[in-house]
Amino acid sequence: MSQVVFLTLDSPEPPVRVDRVPQTHPAWIHPHLIESTDPVKGRQLRVSSLVPKGTCLLTDRPYAVIPVVDDPTINENLICSNPACNIRGIGLAERCQCPNGCIPDVVWCSRACKDVDSIRHEFECSWLKRYSKSIRTKRGEYEFGMLWVIVRLLATRQCELNDMAFTKESQLGLHRWKTGWEGISLLCGSPDTWSHERVRAWSNLVKKYLQNSPILPHGLSTESLLHLICQEEANSFGLYPRETGIFPIPESWPGRGEQFAAAVYPTAAMANHSCSPNIIHKPDDRGCMVFTAARDIQPGEECCIAYFDLTQHNNITSRRQHLQNSFGFICRCERCVSEKAPEQNSEWNLLPMMDIE
Ligand SMILES: C[S@@+](CC[C@H](N)C(=O)[O-])C[C@H]1O[C@@H](n2cnc3c(N)ncnc32)[C@H](O)[C@@H]1O
């Protein structure tokens, strides 16, 4: 059963028909890509038979995505807020803005996209109006972005709860992979996997900005919200215009470019990190995450991406430090295990998993 909503426009244009909320299913998963579990790394992606170099293994739609740009009033890299579109690169002339003037980062590429997205945007609009300025001023862009991703996750969840067709398909287990909110709830990351300081700071943010209220009517407990932040921090992707994970790095490689968005994907988040990845990843022009085989991948082999730009951290000490500080785990990829930094060897087995600082 599809939910049909008619939205009335101010102008004499015909009403826009919304058949159902935007789909959050993975757009496509290669039939030979499988999920398994590693005793140290947790869930992982593998292939069940030989996958030749250049094969596309996954395109995953974001469950939530936000733009990340310095000055949204002039930057042309903003993405369309409508999750069914999410096109990047909206020129200043063609962008539609929020009629309530919530924040300049919220734009749509057309009036049709704005209208189709009105129910979802309504969920975040009052929250953005009420809190964005003070969070940005007092806490900075990073924490604002993190909280906005959480609010967008909750907004998609709300749409999903109202969308009978999606819920029914999920409940019947029609998908081989867990999708939608069910996929998000399976993401790794909990208060136990992060440092006490970080968890305390996030807990304060939840109490101050994310509690269930008429401004943010999600119906979840503060514990669930804290857990969601822990998951988001362990699983969100930065979106860059060029590929991440090309290895060995070609001499003329310019790097992946400047970040333009951040997103959470239910299936792409299952990929573990390797400092010599066999998968390169890159968002398409609509924010879908695309995984491509960087070389031939043998049957049973794990599929790994690089969580960071390998040109920026080229020795083991720098790579380990970066992964611990930014992602909260000690890298156990084959390259790190074989290269072990001499000065860190003695501590290697003593360090707790996933504990930052
Ligand atoms: C984005 S998730 C990847 C999927 C995750 N394994 C799961 O169970 O859902 C990132 C987490 O996976 C684990 N992980 C990823 N790459 C790893 C690596 N190279 N070495 C050790 N743990 C890794 C860490 O716990 C990390 O916080």
Image (tube, rainbow, N blue to C red):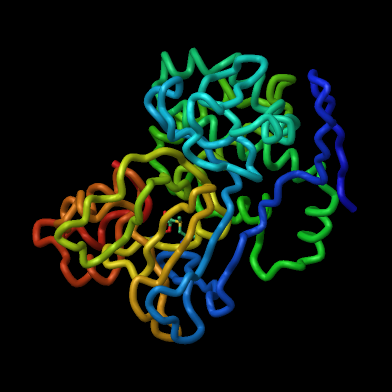
Residue at (37% x, 40% y) in the render: 259
Residue 288, compared with residue 116, is above or below; it is: below
Q: Is residue 126 left or right of residue 236?
A: right
Residue extending furthest toward the left: 342
Q: How many numbered marks appear?
A: 0
Find residue 320 and report its horizontal and vertical position in percent: 23, 54
Residue at (47% x, 68% y) in the render: 44
Along the line of sight, the residue nearer the viewer: 197 or 220: 220
Find residue 168 and report its horizontal and vertical position in percent: 83, 57
Find residue 243 and report its horizontal and vertical position in percent: 35, 56
Report ligand 1 position as a quadrant.
Answer: bottom left
Q: Is residue 329 left or right of residue 37?
A: left
Residue 250 visible in the picture:
yes
Find residue 21 and report its horizontal and vertical position in percent: 75, 44
Residue 200, compared with residue 283, is above or below; it is: above
Q: Is residue 45 left or right of residue 347?
A: right
Residue 135, compared with residue 7, is above or below; it is: above
Residue at (70% x, 20% y) in the render: 215
Along the line of sight, the residue nearer the viewer: 67 or 73: 73
Q: Is residue 147 left or right of residue 246?
A: right
